[in-house]
Amino acid sequence: MTAPGTLTIRIDDHHLTFEVEGGTVHEVPVGPLTLTNGPLADGDPPPPASLTNALGLVHDHLDDLLIAAPSIGAVPAVIAVGPHATAMARVEIGVADVPPDYELARSAADEVFRTLAVEPVDERRHNPGLPLAHAESIIGTCCVILGIMRRFDLQAVDIASSAADTSGTGG
């Protein structure tokens, strides 16, 4: 069970679901595959302008969310869940098993992003811990997680993993 006021963000292929413990649920129409098939689709690896546009799209959707639900911006803790979040944690630690209550620091998320953003998908497939099913979407995942961390000025997010998060992608 999570603490009251904790924001849980489910990262699915084409949307993000924000749920404050004991509160309301909001959905944002952007996810890793939205970015992978949209602004990040014009290169392998995507050019810097495409990365900027992907981060900007996430930021714009989060701005809309904060207009609709301003209290979301003042939550005491954030937990990211789903196969995409788990894939990012797996790359950061370089192994398949994400420890319970794993905390992804913003500096580590930035480093993963900087490393993966310049690798073509064939090179990304060789990163320790990265599930093959996420080799194409991991840059989109980085943009989503970094966009959230930057917009909410977070120094870290907790990554909650489950057995269901270890291979596939979310809906």
Image (cartoon, grey):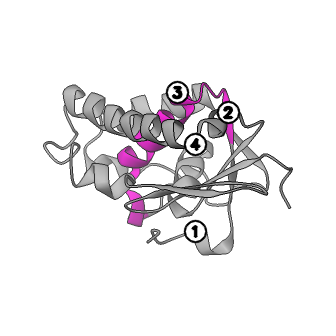
Q: Secondary structure at mark 3?
A: helix
Instruction: Specify the quadrant of the image occupied by residue 119.
Output: top left
Give me the residue at 54% from left, 63% from top. Answer: 83
Which mark, by number, is residue 166? 1
Q: Disc 3 vs disc 2: which is toward the camera? A: 3
Q: Disc 1 vs disc 3: which is toward the camera? A: 3
Residue that sits furthest to the bottom in the current view: 164
* Range shown magenta: 132-157
Q: Secondary structure at mark 2?
A: strand
Q: Is residue 4 left or right of residue 26?
A: right
Q: Disc 4 vs disc 3: which is toward the camera? A: 4
Badge 1 density bin: few <14, some 14–19, many ≥20, Cα 10 Å: many
Q: Disc 2 vs disc 4: which is toward the camera? A: 4
Q: Is residue 51 left or right of residue 93?
A: left
Q: Disc 4 vs disc 1: which is toward the camera? A: 4
Residue at the spot of label 2: 156
Residue at the spot of label 4: 69
Q: Earlier in the sequence, mark 1 or mark 3?
A: 3
Q: Quadrant of the C terminus?
A: bottom left
Q: Quadrant of the N terminus?
A: bottom right
Question: Which amino acid is tagged 1?
Answer: Thr
Badge 3 density bin: few <14, some 14–19, many ≥20, Cα 10 Å: some
Q: CA distance from mark 4 to mark 3?
A: 18 Å
Give me the residue at 57% from left, 62% from top. Answer: 82
Q: Secondary structure at mark 1?
A: loop
